[in-house]
Amino acid sequence: MNHRLFAVIVMGATLTACSGMPDRDTAPDWINGVSVKYPNDRYLTGRGTAPAVTDAQDRARADLAKQFEVAIQEQAQQSQHFEQTTQGDLITQSLEQQVSRSLLAHTSRSLQGVEIAELWHDAARNQEHALAVLQRDKARRQFEQEIAALDDSANHHLEQANVESQPLYKAARVQQAIEAQQNRIAVQASLRVADPSGQGIPPRLSLAELVRTRDALLSKVTIATSTTDNSIVELPKILGGATAAAGFTVSDADKADYRLTAAAKLDPPLRESGWNWQRGTVEVNLLDKNGKSLGVQRWPFKVSSTTEERARQRLTDTINETLQRELRATLLSFAPAP
């Protein structure tokens, strides 16, 4: 009887070994090397290790994402350097921020196809291992389609610019083409990671040339600036400086194509928990020669400091920084849709 039982056990073990089932005691090839099942020329991979399975999976996804993050950081640095060599300081800062936002926003979308392909438990160390994979071909096709759509969008906006008669509206269409090309930078960075050749699809439009075209158009737009209250003494100077820095030509009211007004509404200073708070809003309104409002934009502000005087100064500085950074895009957004 014992001999029969022993024979059955041996036979069962032999059948199991021949069935091709993985040996849980032997680490799979992807733990310390390249996976035969998921080769580099077909897959992007990431590895994660943790005591819990869910944590190992998250770390594997993060490890795969690093490949995109590195590429995006390199592309952002190249874009910043590119803008610094072709534009002034203010324009460079604005474009850098827009490009960076586009690049960062695209990172999560780049990883939609990531899957946890395999798990392995290291019994000796009581650790869970996870392998995350992303098919290169699938990701590459997605990015190529996005690039094609962005190129079509940029070309469409440039065609619209050609039929516009007013420089402000022309500049607004060119700005839309610029934004499409900025988004393209993000997709191209992701595509170069997914593409085994690392080449991606070179752009057909020059971002530098688009920026130069937009700036040339903006210089032809004359704007008279004014404020409708005296709650912030520095506001007239801030508004005029931000308008000029945005690339527009500041002019007298009788010669200007547009009039840009600004008004500030401040709450009474508040002292709370040892801090002095200053809250308020700033509103700008762009009007044409006939006094018709083309658009209104409001920015809320909330600052604090140890003294009321410093809080007020910080509020003024914050308003100045915001208008320097956002006024150009705001005014261009007022251009009516074609």
Image (cartoon, rainbow, N blue to C red):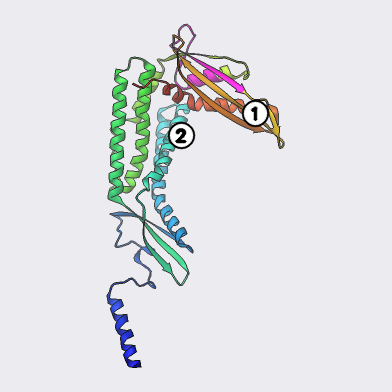
Image coordinates of residue 14 in percent, x first then y, are 29, 81
User: Which of the two labelled residues, at mark 2 and mark 1, occupies the earlier sequence position?
Assistant: 2
Q: Residue at x 35, y 30 (%)?
A: 207
Q: Which residues are magenta?
A: 238-265
Return the residue found at the far front: 1
Q: Residues within 10 Å of mark 1 (few under 14, many from 20)?
A: many
Return the residue found at the far right: 274
The C terminus - image quarter: top left
Q: Residue at x 40, y 36 (%)?
A: 79
- Residue 196 visible in the displayed image: no
**Residue 274 occupies quadrant:** top right
> What secondary structure is found at the residue carrying circle 1?
strand
Please tell me whether residue 29 is drawn above or below residue 293 in the rendered image: below
Q: CA distance from mark 2 to mark 1?
A: 27 Å
Q: Residue at x 62, y 31 (%)?
A: 303
Is residue 248 one of those drawn in magenta? yes
Image coordinates of residue 129 in percent, x first then y, are 42, 63
Q: Which mark is residue 278?
A: 1
Q: Is residue 316 left or right of residue 173?
A: right
Query: Of 84 and 248, which appears nearest the observer?
Result: 248
**Residue 201 occupies quadrant:** top left
Q: Which mark is residue 97?
A: 2
Is residue 68 one of those drawn in magenta? no
Q: Residues within 10 Å of mark 2 (few under 14, many from 20)?
A: some
The N terminus - image quarter: bottom left
Query: Of 90 and 328, which appears nearest the observer?
Result: 328
Type of the residue with mark 2? Gln
- Residue 222 visible in the displayed image: yes
> What secondary structure is found at the residue carrying circle 2?
helix
Type of the residue with mark 1? Gln
